[in-house]
Structure formats: C-alpha cells, structure tokens
Image (cartoon, rainbow, N blue to C red):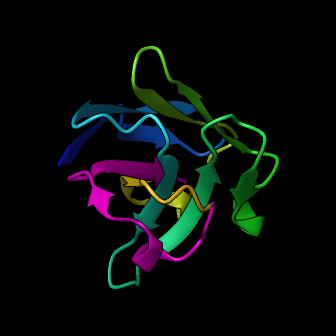
Amino acid sequence: QVQLQESGGGLVQAGGSLRLSCTLSGRTCTNCVVAWFRQGPEKERMFVAALSVSGNAVRYRESVRGRFTISRDNAKNMVYLQMNNLKPEDTAAYYCAADPQGIVSSRDGSYNYWGQGTQVTVSS
C-alpha cells in the first residue's frame, strides 16, 4: 500500500502563488506516475497535471498550462505542484494521486492511490 499526504494549501489572493507538496510513503512506488487532481465545491474531480517517473512525460489541464508546474524528487519521495498567477476559479481541494502502472493519464480511474487533499482558496 502506498500512502500519500498533501500539504501547502491555504488562502491566497488572486495573482499569488502557492506550492503544494505530496509525500509518498509505505510500499515503494519508484515506478509510479504521479498526478494532481482538484475538486471545487459542487464540482466533479478534475485532472490538473501528471508526471512520469523520469519526468520526460507530462500532461496539464489546459486552463493551468503555463501557470502550474508539476515536479518530483524521487530521492525524497516527494511530488510538488507550483501554482503561479492563481485565479479564483482555481479554488478547490487538491489531491495527489499515484499509479504504479506508469501511464501518464488524465483519468482519475487510472490512479490507485490518493491523498486526503489540501484546500486552496483564491480570493478575488
């Protein structure tokens, strides 16, 4: 079993930045693709970004491309989401996910392991 724990959420003004972190622990997940999803109030969970083990393959949701950057430190078992130029519509609970199959996917069904989420609120 792989455990994921997010941190770094908070309240920020529009135009500001936040960096979310996700710690992977438990069973080794060295070949896991990692991803971030988000779920706003009364909305479905949506894909944000995903990254392969090597970092060579990456996908972003179109609305965050150029503002968000997903990265990972495999030696530290950490995943990050740097979020710049935040907008009120980015307000959501953000979830870290991992997939041992190694497929960089935007489908939440592709991911076996999930964190509990961290809240990001962007004020206008």
Q: Is residue 39 above or below residue 74?
A: below
User: Which residue does the image show at 39% across and 49% down from the upper left?
Assistant: 120
Which quarter of the image is occupied by the C terminus? bottom right
| Residue 87 visible from this viewpoint | no
Q: Which picture quadrant has residue 93? A: bottom left
Q: Closest to the observer: 7 or 105?
A: 105
User: Which residue does the image show at 76% across and 48% down from the upper left?
Assistant: 57
Q: Closest to the observer: 92 or 36?
A: 36
Identify the residue at the far right of this view: 66
Q: Horizontal and vertical percent for residue 35?
A: 51, 53
Span colored in magenta? 104-124
Q: Horizontal and vertical percent for residue 77?
A: 39, 24
User: Which residue does the image show at 25% across and 51% down from the upper left?
Assistant: 115
Is residue 24 shown left or right of residue 21? left
Q: Closest to the observer: 8 or 123?
A: 8
Is 17 one of the magenta-colored residues?
no
Is residue 35 shown left or right of residue 43? right
Is 123 one of the magenta-colored residues?
yes
